[in-house]
Image (spheres, rainbow, N blue to C red):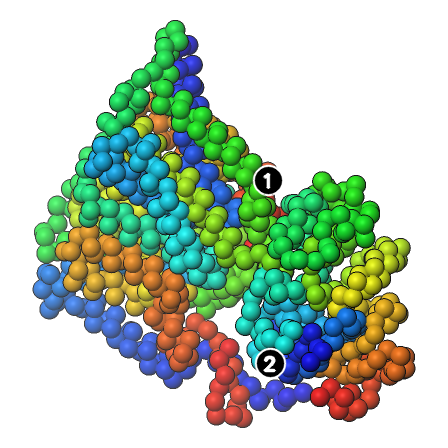
Amino acid sequence: MTAPSAVRVERWTPGSRIATAIGVVLIVFLAVGPVFFNANVIDKLTLLFIYVILAAMWNALAGYGGLISVGQQAFFGLGAYSAVRLANLGLNPFLSLFVGAILVGAVSLPISTFMLRLKTSEFAIGMWVIAELAHLLVNLDGLINGETGTSFIELNQYDADVRHTLIYWSALAAMVGLLAIVFLLLRSRVGVSIQAIRDNEDAAASIGVKVFITKRIVFVLAAAGAAAAGALWVASAITFQPQTYFSVQWTAYMIFMVLVGGIGTFEGAIVGAVIFFLIEAWFGAAGVWYLVGLGATALLFSLFLPRGIWGSLEDRFGVRLLPVGYRVKSTATANPPDA
Amino acid sequence: MNDILAVDQLDVRHGLLQAVRGVSFAVAKGEIVAFVGANGAGKTTLFRAIAGAHRPTGGRVFFQGNDITPMPAYDRVRRGIALVPEGRRLFTQLSVLENLTLAGAVRRPGRWDLKAVLKVFPNLGGRLNSMAGNLSGGEQQATAIGRALMTNPDVILLDEISLGLSPAAVGRVYDSLRTLIKTGTTILLVEQDLNRALSVADRVICMLEGKIAAEGRVQDMTREQITDAYFGLHRAAAQGAGT
Amino acid sequence: MMDWTNSIIQGVLLGGYYSLIACGLAFMFQVMGVINLAHGTLAVLAGFAIWTVSDHLGVSPFVALIGVLPAMAAVGWILQRGILERSARGGQLVPLLATFGLAVVIENLLFEGFGADTRSLAPYLDTLAYDSWEIGDIYIGQLSVLIFFVAVALLGGLSLFLSHTHLGRAIRATAEDPDTVGLIGINARKINAAATCIAMLTVAVAGMFLGMRATFTPYSGPAQLVFAFEAAVIGGSGSLWGTLVGGIVLGVAQSIGAHINPQGFLIAGHVVFLVILVARVSVVMPVFGSLARRLRGRTS
């Protein structure tokens, strides 16, 4: 029997302390950014924040929940739709973004009841059908009027600069908030359950993990997050055309970001979003070839580097910046093995 | 070299476990070798590695003088090695006839065809069109052995063919084994039932925790020697005998 | 009354097309446990290939199909050996992602090559696309009937193939237990490649009929994938014939939906699909999962 003090279980490492400190500083910097950023930078950063949200949410669903969905655009579109609809009904436009996301999260709850009972591949395309159906139903709304769509005109009450700054802060708040929720979730009992389920569902159930509830939490969170992203997008773009928001293209982007960044890793989603943002900035104008490149990259990564960039780095160097795991440290030896 | 099958320093992992460690032995043509040992001793993993169903981490397998270590299972079958796997692993969604004819498509020359197999296992005659999943344990075992025979192997590996069968069924299976023995096929078998194993084998190899703990001709070894090795008593002696 | 009858008949015939596009998807899933998200896009690829041959050589699409079939079989071989086999090692996740990426690549390359214009194979068909028989007040399109019979023939042929040929038996055995087939001298990788080739042959036929009965663009793939999937799942495909049942249910639902409301075509299809799916998971185990698992004799 080893002495009880021979082993210590830690959550924070020096590396993760530094990384978290840097993260906090970064967030503060970004928050005060609009004071000295020009309008272009503000818009570009807003875009990046939205991408991070999309990537983090799809990653939470797929990488941590083991739920591959080819239909998250359902919630992206519904989030945008809710925001526009609520504002149309008289609610403050920025409040509409927030409330809209919550509403979509609530709507996703009954959807989860039956969708989560499906097997992997059925779930994947089943969610796509939900997205198609959502698209068709939204088209029926008189305000939307089919594919014509409508505009988020209630935002016009704000000055252009003020509007962009408010959207920026909303996006930053949403991104930080959602990332924080994911982070806390992963550190909590739910998080461990999630990863246990992802690794082996039957085994997890056999040790008392409440599989269904856990998956549900992840599902609703991912839905609300995607909805927030959609609401933020429509706030930036002003116009809402169902075809754009319910397009499976959004799933393509999410898949790309998470695959390249590193599926199932917290940092990977952020890395993937940044890479996607840069690639789009540089190559987006290449039109069709840009899309071919995206698809080919996703294909190649899935075949040859399925752990993504960050995942591979993590595997090779044991680097983990954010303390979502546990490390078992032997107080006797110098080299702590990873748990 | 008279050895039809030889294994040299074979290491096989099963998941994270080292199931077979540095196992070496040779089998002569026509010999019948029984592998005994407790559960988890590595016998099934060893058989699967010989058949090509499991990739070894070290060591080599020789068949008829050739190094077949890199060869996949289906190539080894074409060369003349057949495995009747533990648990039978029949294709339950196919009929008995389909299970047999599928194996027969290998078209190795030899004495075994559908008629010959049915002669050895007459109880299958009436069940040819039944789904393999609907058979009794004994019938399933017969089908599994028959399926391997249809590939006309020079070496046949039988893994726990008495498992889950009634004593009567086991008796029938071992009776059919005698017919097989008369044809001069080389047989390796894993068998929990020591009596049965010793009743048909020329040689016995006892495995313990992945290594060979004892081996010798059946007539030369006493019952005590075998059970000692089986249970790991006199471990120092067992380890010495394993190299 | 006649209107409803007409809708139902059109729906049933449409079901024939759906079973055509669905059977390849269901077949691949049964054998390899993989849902090919590029399925619809591959049908569109075949459609474009047939269009190109018909256009340049001035032949009927049926003749063009003869040349395209081996090409699609080759595509299937490459798909299996190059992508599906490799990605299957990554679990359930990776094949979905890989085939999704592939679909994006193919449809955008098609766009690059053919542009956004809608295409149709109907102009190369004389009048087959428009001819119909008149029974009272009901018009029954000759092309639709042809598609239905081809679907039945194809399903019948596939069933016979699976039960009466060596390759068919080998495919069924490999679907159940790919590890053990090696023990009786069968190369599981080759079998899976053959199965994918066969699936691609059905995809080529479906692509041809897609072009004949409707128009298509490089981005028409996803819609076809969704229909194929819905038909396969509704039919609860434990057998290939399930795709015909599912296709008919889907087609009839859509036709009746369209009859009620112009927007109703797609909505009705999706709603019926979801209702059946919900009913199934509430009452019976998901069919794909458990039946396929039993087919393969192992847990997924």
Q: Position of residue B79 (x, y in %)?
A: 62, 65
Above or below, C202 against B85 in this view is above
In the picture, which quadrant includes the N terminus of chain C? Answer: top left
Q: Residues under labels 2 and 1: Cα distance?
A: 42 Å
Horizontally, residue A70 falls left or right of residue A113, namely left
Label 2 sits on residue: B59
> What type is the residue that disc 2 sits on?
Gly
Q: Is residue C21 visible?
A: yes
Q: Position of residue A278 (x, y in %)?
A: 20, 64
Helix, strand or loop status at disc 2: strand
The reply to whether the C-beta atoms of the residues labelled 2 and 1 are less than 8 Å apart is no
Q: Which residue is at a point 79% across and 91% down the rendered structure image?
A: B237
Q: Which residue is at a point 51% across and 30% down the rendered structure image?
A: C245
Q: Is residue C289 visible?
A: no
Horizontally, residue C256 falls left or right of residue C108, namely right
Q: Residues within 10 Å of mark 1 (few under 14, many from 20)?
A: some
Q: Position of residue C250 (x, y in %)?
A: 44, 30
Quadrant in the picture for residue C259: top left
Q: Which residue is at a point 39% across and 9% down the rendered structure image?
A: C135
Horizontally, residue C291 falls left or right of residue B221, namely left
Q: Residues within 10 Å of mark 2 (few under 14, many from 20)?
A: some
Q: Nearer the viewer, residue B66 or C16?
A: B66
Above or below, A306 against A238 in this view is below
> What type is the residue that disc 1 sits on?
Ser
Helix, strand or loop status at disc 1: helix
Q: Do the residues at pointers 2 and 1 share their chain?
A: no
Label 1 sits on residue: C163
User: Farthest residue in the top direction?
Assistant: C136
Q: Which residue is at a point 34% across and 59% down the rendered structure image?
A: A299
Q: To which chain does the residue with label 2 belong? A: B
Q: Position of residue C144 (x, y in %)?
A: 38, 23
Q: Nearer the viewer, residue C263 or B229?
A: B229
